[in-house]
Amino acid sequence: MTTLLIYAGPGDAAGDGTRTGGLPLVPSGFTWPHCGSCDAPLQFTAQVRVGPVIAVFHCRHESRAFRFAADRLSGPAAAPGAVLSDVSAVRFVEAPGNYAQARDAWPRRRDVLGQLGGSPVWLRGEQIPDCPACGTAMAFVAQLEVDGGCAYVFTCRPCAEAACCYQC
Ligand SMILES: [Zn+2]
Ligand SMILES: [Zn+2]
């Protein structure tokens, strides 16, 4: 079984649940991330609520994820120069098969925003990141459809770290 993330119409821009687009809710003091290669502000892709909230950012050159305790969120991030996309609500649908099978069976492919939990379906081979704090393999959180490829989101619960890699 796969838990698909399905587009559910315009979303609440102030929502602290799983959604795509708009501005992420962040703790005070958060600084909008910039790409290490081209120096442009990263594009905010999605926030995924798994107890804590994981915010995912993307550029053609790199993907980053930040994990925030839900009770530490203070408001939307300030986004100097970042391109914002529309806020979309997300619903969760259980579907048979792995993610690729469930996605391809969905009647409107562009409504499939990704999957929550389960197992990643890699486009270019397994790439599980090690936690930057403790060095162990991180746990899979979500796979998101981004820019014609997939962003793979991971976390280390004991260290409260998050990471993201992108394949296309
Ligand atoms: Zn870049
Ligand atoms: Zn760790």
Image: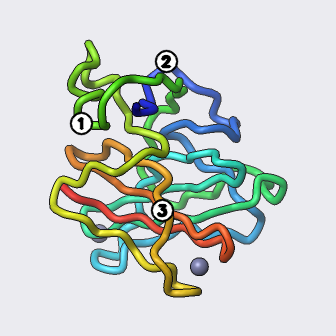
* Label 3 within 8 A of ligand 2 by Cβ: no
Viewer-side label of 2, 1: 1
Who comes first in sequence, dot 3 or dot 2? 2
| Residue 3 picture location, percent across and down | 46, 32
Does 59 sit above or below residue 132?
Answer: above
Q: Which residue is mark 3?
A: 154
Q: How many marks?
A: 3
| Residue 29 picture location, percent across and down | 73, 71
Q: Amino acid at mark 3?
A: Phe
Q: Label 1 vs label 3: CA separation?
A: 19 Å
Q: Quadrant of residue 69?
A: bottom right
Q: Label 2 vs label 1: CA separation?
A: 23 Å
Which residue is found at the position 69% from the left and 61% from the top?
68
Q: Secondary structure at mark 2?
A: strand
Q: Nearer the viewer, residue 46 or 142?
A: 142
Who comes first in sequence, dot 2 or dot 1? 2
Q: Nearer the viewer, residue 141 or 60?
A: 141
